[in-house]
Amino acid sequence: MKLKPRQLEAQTAIFEALDRGVTRQLVSLPTGVGKTVLACHVACNHQSTLFLCHRQELLAQTAATMKRIAPDLEHGFIRPGEHRIEPEGFTIGMIQTVYNRLDRLHPDAFDCVIVDEAHHAASRTWREVLDHFQPRLRLGLTATPERLDGLALSNLFDEITYSMNLGDAVKEQYLVPPSAIQCLTSLNISEVHTRGGDFAENELANLVDDPARNAFIAEKYLEHCAGRKAIAFACNIAHAKNLVSACSDAGITAEWISGDDPDRTAKLERFARGEYQVLANFQILSEGFDDRSVDAILLCRPTKSKSLFAQMIGRGLRLNEGKTDCKVLDFVDNAGKHSLVTSWKFFGHTAPPTSEAPLGIADEPRKKESRVAAIDLERQIDLLKPPPVIDEFNYGSRDWHYQPATDKQLLFLSKLGYDVVTNDFSKGQAAGIIGGQPASMKQLRELADHGYDVSAEWTRGQASRALDESRDIMFIALDKIRSRGFKIAASGNQLKVDPIDQLDLIQRSWIDRNRKPLLSALRAEMN
């Protein structure tokens, strides 16, 4: 199995970076472009490779891919019930099993360690496993170069060696084009709490698992995706089952599946044979699922996680004979203060395209007691605008970023619902989360004092940066005032300039307008 041009470019970039001394690398390729094939070719250039997976299904898929690429290369497994290492070959390991057996594995056992679906590597388990080994190359593979909680993976990798956006993958015919329609509902999820960077699962499910909303989803499937094989992403098992009921009521054949479902293998086989049109799932089909005939995605669960969004839509973009596109129905609720990852935002739009007016309004009125009103809209979305350039600050530009998070930072993260017991956080990652929270009332008051428009949404990080810049300007102003022979000081909330009668009208007007920022700068000087 030869590498395609983009895979070949990525492989070249990996080894060029390795020659530069970059031993901890991250490669970002859209789902379906062939990350596993690339990894297997990289492994063939090393004497002994450990390939780390987090799910049982991924072990079998990786072994099958390696068998096609290098049929003569021996491969072993580290998984429950088996511990067989190939010192001159390819070893595939379940992360939890490897963690439990670190005392049986020498740090120099492998000269290459590959992390599959690297956006999962947030826990201390992953970090302790990766820090245990001393390979020549640590390589992470992901569709989006960030953790599920939105943080950079910079505590584990030093450089994004190669990346490809989804728009290029479609243009170069690695994937079919996504055709997205936003289905806007009036369901209010603004009061749902955030836990670990995404919605609190049970709270979200209690709202979105609404009979009218589920019926609306089935209605839109029939309107836009009739005859297509679709995967629906649900908030929990009950939501998946209720989506199946709504589909059945609408005459759509459907089944549900979850990670704990003992019949999941049989259900997947029946879905692959086309025995039902919609497969509603919870926590299983976002990764490692490879049914190329899927040509519709129903995003029934809102999310704030870019990584999760990428994994969900990626399930329908793989090439298949006769497949020309993948229809994505993006069900978007009223999120209020929350920042949802939606189809237009994921693909780089900073606001909904103004040229895309709603296509229509649901004709049949909803019941008054329903939480889904009759103002459900649709909007066609262009999905091929590339996402913003990755902020390289997160990868190696600041040494302090890699230091462990402080106790104060961890306490703050804990209050936000992040799991600081089992998950790993660097000082820079914690700063990123905290800086992304809404600005405090104190910051907003200071911004207003400094002349900023506080009617817009401000994050803590934006407010802090703006206030620092404004104070720098005030420090320069203080120096200029003093250089002209004036004394300026703070007395409580009063600003005193002496001799005040020597100020001309313009100078006095400027000082009056900037009294509060000048007072803030003077207090900062005293501290």
Image: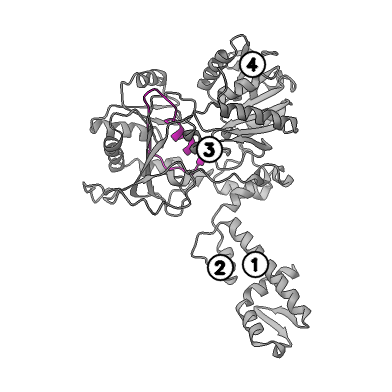
N-terminal label among 4 and 3: 4
Q: Position of residue 347 (x, y in %)?
A: 48, 43
Q: Which residues are magenta?
A: 296-323
Residue 455 visible in the snapshot: yes
Image position of 511 (left or right of 68): right
> For mark 1, what is the residue?
470
Crowd around label 1: few <14 · some 14–19 · many ≥20 (10 Å)? some
Residue at x 49%, y 32% (from the top left corner): 172
Residue at x 54%, y 34% (from the top left corner): 143
Residue 392: image quadrant is: top right
> For mark 3, what is the residue?
165
Instruction: Tell me the tag on residue 90.
Output: 4
Which structural element holds mark 1?
helix
N-terminal label among 2 and 4: 4
Marks 1 & 2, CB-CB < 8 Å contact: yes
N-terminal label among 4 and 1: 4
Residue 4: image quadrant is: top right
